[in-house]
Structures are given as structure tokens and as C-alpha cells.
Image (cartoon, rainbow, N blue to C red):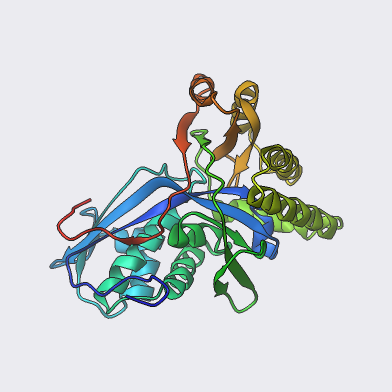
Amino acid sequence: MAADGGIPAQPLPVAARAPGKCIVFGEHAVVHGAPALVMAIDLETQLFARAAPATSLNSDAEAVRENPYFREGLARAWPDGPPLAVRAVSRIPRGAGLGSSAAFSAALVAALGAVTGGIARRDLAQRAFEVERAAQGVGSPTDTAASVAGGCVALNGGDGPPLWSVRTDERAWEVRRVPDPGWVWVVAHSGIRRATGDQVRAVGRRLASADGAALLERFRTVAREGIAAVVREDRAAVAARMRENQALLTEVGVSHPRLEALLAAAAPAAEAAKITGAGGGGSIVVLPIPGREVDLTRRLARAGGLPFVVRPAPHGAGLIESGVRP
């Protein structure tokens, strides 16, 4: 195993898992170098790969061509490898802003990295991001960083232990550990799927407008103060920064009537709630009033959401014990 707790070597067949994620502060702005706080959540994707006569994903041979994450993962982590049958199952709703594609990419790269002699965690983080960015065309390593690291992490913010840097030709993001305050969170999917790349490009155009620099600075301030509030376990300050972050996301145009309905439904049982992820659909994240978690999930379900009570996943992408089949 790599010195940084990476993925050890293991021959085929191999099984891997990776958690989804929830962005607490800084979505969209992090693409442009601003800080973000993201936590891996205890909803995960599991993946099993074995040798086969032809390459497929969940018995679909066309996935190599039609699924961009599978295609890019194979291109980067298995370029000259023999055919594989890959099966993936997930508890993470697709297109929900909860990191389904990041978890799939991280689990796939982890599995193939094991078969090719093991992979250091920093290299897993870089390669999983490259898979996701190639598939989407744009984006930041926020989702894949959480899926690879587990727990809570900050990009370009905080003063916790450094984990690694993730880079493109234009930009680098420093990933640091943030201590988990031990809180319970609730996420709720609106049922509206959205394309992350389209939302990222639209917000990029907004941030390139006349007031874009000032708007980006406001995102930076909210995320920086929010990360510090999480570190000192100040729920009131975290809630206040979440509300500010939500106002900024509304201002850049990534809200949706279904998201607004969920935010309104959550309000009586929440300290704060906001969109998480790219927006335009997808999900919200809620910091519940302690003891009101069940009431909160009922309110969200009655409003048409799919709620999950979550905690930060303690471990990032890794192998499943030999003999376990997802």
C-alpha cells in the first residue's frame, strides 16, 4: 500500500467502493479557485470488475461508447488492459448533486489502480478528477476530492493537514483535512436531474460579467468564514454562512422552483438549508435543529423530496474485502 494510505495491489477480480459527497460551502466559485468545504457522505457506490470476453458495464457493451465516465476511466486507468466486465451499484441518486459520478469515477480508478500494481491516494485523486472533468468538460476536483479522501475536506481554504494538490494546466487546488464536528445532516433530492457541466458554464458566464469579480469575492468570504465556523463547531455561525451562500447561489441563477419548495418545507425544522452542488435541480443540504431530524425528513418527503439523513463518511475510496460482491 502507498505511504499515503493508497490502494494496494490486488489481482482481478476486484471490488471497490467510494462515497458520495455534499458541498456545504463554495460550489461553483471553487471552479474559479475560491475555497469550498465538502464532506463525503455515507451513501456510496460499489463496483466489481472481472476479466471477461468483452468490456461491459452492468452487462451493457455500449457503455464504453455511451457512458463518458466509464469511457474516460478506462482510457486513463486501463488504456491497454484486457476486456473487463464491470458491475456498479449505487445508493446515490444520479444527477442529484450528491456525487454519483465522482463516486463511480473514484471507485473505478481505485479498482483498476489496484489491478495495475496499486495507486497512491494523491494519484487516485488526480486521476479521478481527470476522468470527471473529461466527461463533463468543466469543473473542479471538489466532488472527487471528497470521494477519495472521505470525511470533511477544504479546497483552497482552512488550515488543517494538507492531503494533496489537484491540478490542471490552468489551476491548482490544495486539499486539506477539516475535522468532522460530529453533526447529523439531511440531504434531499428534488427529483429534478441536471447536467453539471451546463450549470458550471452558465455560472462561469455570470462570474465573467461586470460585477463578477465582486460576486466571486463574496463567495470566497462566505466559504472562508464557513470553514472556520465548522472547525470551531459553531453551529450558529455555520447556519448563518449557509444562508448567505444560498443567497449567492440564488443570485447567480442556479435555483429552481422545486428546490425553493424544499427549502421552504425544511425551514421550520432547520437551522439552515441551501442548495448543494451545481443547482438547477439536484439537491439541498440541511443542518437540522437537533432532535428534529425525523420531523425534517417528513416535511421534505411531503414536499416531494427524497430525503436522506447522512453523516460524513469516515473513509474515502477503497477496496472491498476479497469475496464481497457488490
Q: Is residue 280 left or right of residue 91?
A: right
Q: Is residue 48 above or below residue 274?
A: below
* Residue drawn at x 75%, y 42% as measured from the top left: 244
Q: Nearer the viewer, residue 27 or 74?
A: 27
Q: Position of residue 233 (x, y in %)?
A: 64, 45
Q: Nearer the viewer, residue 132 or 13?
A: 13
Q: Nearer the viewer, residue 273 or 191?
A: 273
Image-quadrant location for residue 32? bottom right
Q: Is residue 62 left or right of residue 164?
A: left
Q: Quadrant of the N terminus?
A: bottom left
Q: Position of residue 29 (x, y in %)?
A: 69, 57
Q: Nearer the viewer, residue 105 or 17?
A: 17
* Residue drawn at x 70%, y 53% as measured from the top left: 228
Q: Is residue 212 left or right of residue 118?
A: right
Q: Position of residue 15 (x, y in %)?
A: 24, 60
Q: Is residue 237 visible?
A: yes
* Residue drawn at x 64%, y 62% as measured from the top left: 31
How many labels, in total? 0
